[in-house]
Image: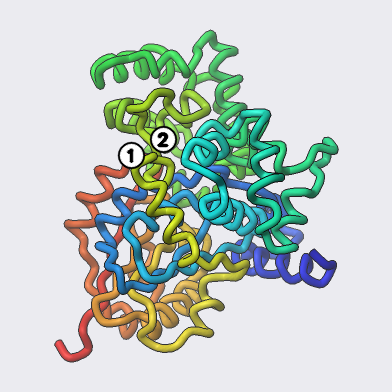
């Protein structure tokens, strides 16, 4: 990436994150987060793709625009065989990860090698898979990213031979949380031995919950910069902390409780990643749809339907024709946005949405940020499916968000 391109990427991320002056404490934090976000943040995405696909009801004729993040969900959406997926992300690292997954699906010899790379993600042979089957098919920029060196001198692709899911800001944050737990003689991996929700809850209440009241954990969460590892920018910190009576500690306790006790462990790969630092072993393991053996040929066949772009979603939509998109996935990006940014985004969504188009997003707090921030003239063109949103959100196995939201575009003739 040239210096001009690097500067442009930085400016786009600053535009999404920075709200305050550089001399204010919040402004400093926003710029630190912006710098951190230029690297890998999410080695795995933390939104439930089964809930997404149920809400979106994807059809073979649909064109979809989604924020990429770790691209797990982008890949999983391919199981529904939409006509086209445009995945956008401000982070060059996330774009490179998405392109790596697509090339791997297209060119690795079989599902076993694909699973070695992205399910296990810690095998010495994975670098050879990259060299032989994937690297020759990458564009120059993506190849340069994975061939590039980290601060420790190792090639970035070697992360897949050392434990990819422990890398990135999120992976390192979870590792720190495990270290703190072990200081209090708690091994979070022990939760995974529980064989019922009742035993999961007992383990959480007697072993994990007390850690939230520890001095070390309170210190960690009192520093807003420490939660950058969860991908929480300063603006989102306030929304998350304000969603619980006892602030950030309470919000994180509630989310962790739901992740630990809300669903059977055999059905929840998010819990395995959080408490076990990897996917569940065995043929019957809970996995993202794109990693399931039964879906591999569909993923391979549909991989060429995805285009991954290093851009903001608003600017990408601004360049598209009217009524050309059937489904939008915004993740939790709106929690970062000002009223002006939200209004600009929804003006473009509304312009490019076909009749009946669906939009989904998640929020740190329970409430949607749109009412009072986006003009009525825009929101009136959409039906907010409140009851369905609450029901879908209650089944989201990632369990870390306060709200799930679904809007459906009204037919102008109705």
Q: Is residue 331 visible?
A: yes
Dot 1, crowdedness within 10 Å: few (<14), some or many (≥20)?
Answer: many
Q: Is residue 405 left or right of residue 293?
A: left
Dot 2, crowdedness within 10 Å: few (<14), some or many (≥20)?
Answer: many
Q: Residue under label 1, please give it.
A: 397
Quadrant where the C terminus sits is bottom left
Q: Is residue 207 left or right of residue 101?
A: left
Q: Residue at x 37, y 12 (%)?
A: 206
The residue most toward the front is 109
Q: Quadrant of residue 258?
A: top left
384 is higher (above) or lower (below) than 303? below
Q: Residue at x 58, y 55 (%)?
A: 103
Residue 200 placement (x, y as % from top left): 31, 19
Task: Check disc 1 and report its element: helix, strand or loop.
Answer: loop
Residue 295 placement (x, y as % from top left): 36, 47
Q: Residue under label 2, please give it.
A: 270
The residue most toward the top is 185
Q: Residue at x 24, y 68 (%)?
A: 384
Which numbered disc, 1 or 2, marks the residue that appears first in the sequence?
A: 2
Residue 167 placement (x, y as % from top left): 64, 37
98 is higher (above) or lower (below) than 293? below
Q: Which mark is residue 104?
A: none
Label 1 with label 2: CB-CB less than 8 Å: yes
Q: Label 1 to label 2, Cα distance in Å?
A: 7 Å
Q: Is residue 32 visible?
A: no
């Amino acid at each position: 990436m040239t210096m001009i391109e690097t500067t442009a990427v930085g400016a786009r991320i600053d535009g999404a994150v920075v709200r305050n002056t550089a001399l204010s404490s919040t402004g400093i934090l926003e710029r630190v987060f912006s710098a951190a976000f230029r690297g890998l943040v999410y080695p795995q995405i933390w939104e439930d793709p089964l809930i997404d696909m149920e809400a979106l009801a994807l059809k073979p004729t649909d064109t979809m625009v989604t924020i990429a993040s770790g691209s797990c969900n982008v890949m999983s959406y391919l199981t529904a065989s939409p006509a086209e997926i445009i995945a956008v992300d401000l982070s060059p690292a996330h774009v490179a990860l998405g392109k790596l997954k697509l090339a791997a699906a297209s060119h690795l010899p079989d599902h076993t090698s694909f699973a070695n790379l992205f399910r296990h993600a810690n095998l010495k042979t994975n670098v050879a898979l990259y060299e032989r089957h994937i690297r020759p098919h990458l564009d120059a920029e993506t190849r340069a990213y994975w061939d590039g060196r980290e601060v420790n001198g190792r090639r970035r692709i070697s992360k897949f031979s050392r434990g990819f899911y422990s890398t990135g800001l999120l992976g390192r944050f979870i590792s720190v949380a495990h270290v703190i737990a072990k200081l209090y003689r708690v091994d979070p991996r022990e939760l995974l031995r529980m064989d019922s929700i009742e035993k999961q809850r007992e383990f959480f209440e007697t072993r994990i919950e007390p850690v939230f009241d520890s001095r070390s954990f309170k210190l960690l969460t009192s520093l807003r910069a420490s939660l950058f590892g969860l991908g929480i920018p300063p603006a989102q910190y306030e929304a998350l902390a304000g969603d619980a009576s006892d602030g950030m500690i309470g919000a994180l306790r509630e989310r962790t409780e739901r992740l630990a006790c809300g669903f059977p462990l055999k059905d929840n790969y998010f819990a395995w990643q959080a408490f076990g630092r990897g996917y569940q072993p065995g043929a019957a393991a809970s996995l993202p749809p794109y990693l399931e053996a039964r879906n591999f040929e569909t993923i391979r066949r549909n991989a060429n339907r995805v285009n991954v772009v290093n851009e903001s979603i608003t600017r990408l939509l601004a360049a598209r024709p009217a009524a050309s998109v059937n489904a939008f996935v915004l993740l939790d990006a709106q929690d970062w946005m000002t009223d002006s940014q939200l209004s600009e985004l929804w003006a473009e969504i509304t312009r490019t949405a076909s009749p009946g188009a669906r939009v989904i997003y998640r929020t740190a707090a329970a409430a949607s940020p749109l009412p009072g921030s986006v003009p009525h003239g825009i929101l009136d063109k959409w039906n907010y499916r409140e009851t369905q949103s609450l029901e879908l959100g209650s089944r989201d196995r990632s369990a870390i968000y306060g709200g799930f939201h679904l809007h459906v575009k009204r037919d102008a003739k109705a």
